[in-house]
Amino acid sequence: MSRIIEPGEKHYAATVVVVSNSTPAKALLLHHRKYDRWMPPGGHQESHENPIETAIRETQEETGIDISALITPITILDDHVNTLPTPGYFLEESVPAHGDQPAHYHLDQVYVVKVPEQVVQLEAAKAHGIGWFTLEETEQLNTFDNVHMILRKELAT
């Protein structure tokens, strides 16, 4: 059952900047159908998920890569409290109106994960293409300024 989105609502999202541990480092990006831009895997946090679960699920769905063993684990403090890993970036992003959805915001928790460069699968329903890109190659890609900023930082290290 879908619900009506109110203009200006804020939705939690999780994004994963997947970086190869090769030299030179490369970022895994998808060409997003809705935005017609290259972006890291990610998406809306479901009501039954925490941001780590969203990050793992979205990366698996969109690329075929299981990052569950690579992301900092959740720490159980006691019967009532868990400590979640801190994201590398926490962004408030304005999302323009699209179709019957009004303009709203994403509170995007962005995690960075290093993996071996590998063959990946494309989730054709959401993306036109998928690939590994060096920092120099990402500079030529159509993406958002915040994605360029994060890629410059993460691929330069």
Image (cartoon, grey):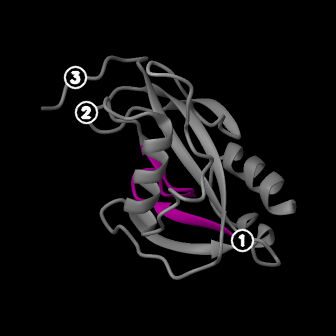
Q: Residue furthest left?
A: 1
Q: Is residue 145 above or below residue 30?
A: above
Q: Quadrant of residue 7?
A: top left
Residue at the image position 77 percent from the left and 47 percent from the top: 149
Report how far apart the C-alphas of labels 3 and 2 lie in the structure. Answer: 9 Å
Q: What segment is highlighted magenta in the picture?
A: 26-43
Q: Which residue is mark 1?
A: 26
Q: Mark 3 or mark 2, which has the lower sequence index?
A: 3
Report x, y in % for residue 138. Answer: 71, 66
Q: Earlier in the sequence, mark 2 or mark 1?
A: 1
Q: Which numbered mark, 3 or 1, is in the foreground of this view?
A: 1
SS for dot 3: loop
Disc marking residue 4 = 3
Q: Picture quarter containing residue 4?
A: top left
Tag count in the figure?
Answer: 3
Q: Give percent across and percent down for residue 76.
A: 53, 31
SS label for mark 2: loop
Q: Where residue 110 is drawn, which disc sits there?
A: none
Amino acid bearing label 1: Lys
Graded by Cα atoms within 10 Å as few (under 14), some (14 to 19) or many (20 or more), the crowding at tag 3 reads few
Label 3 or label 1, whichever comes before in sequence order: 3
Indicate the amino acid at tag 2. Answer: Asp
Give the foreground label among 3 and 2.
Answer: 3
Under mark 3, the amino acid is: Ile
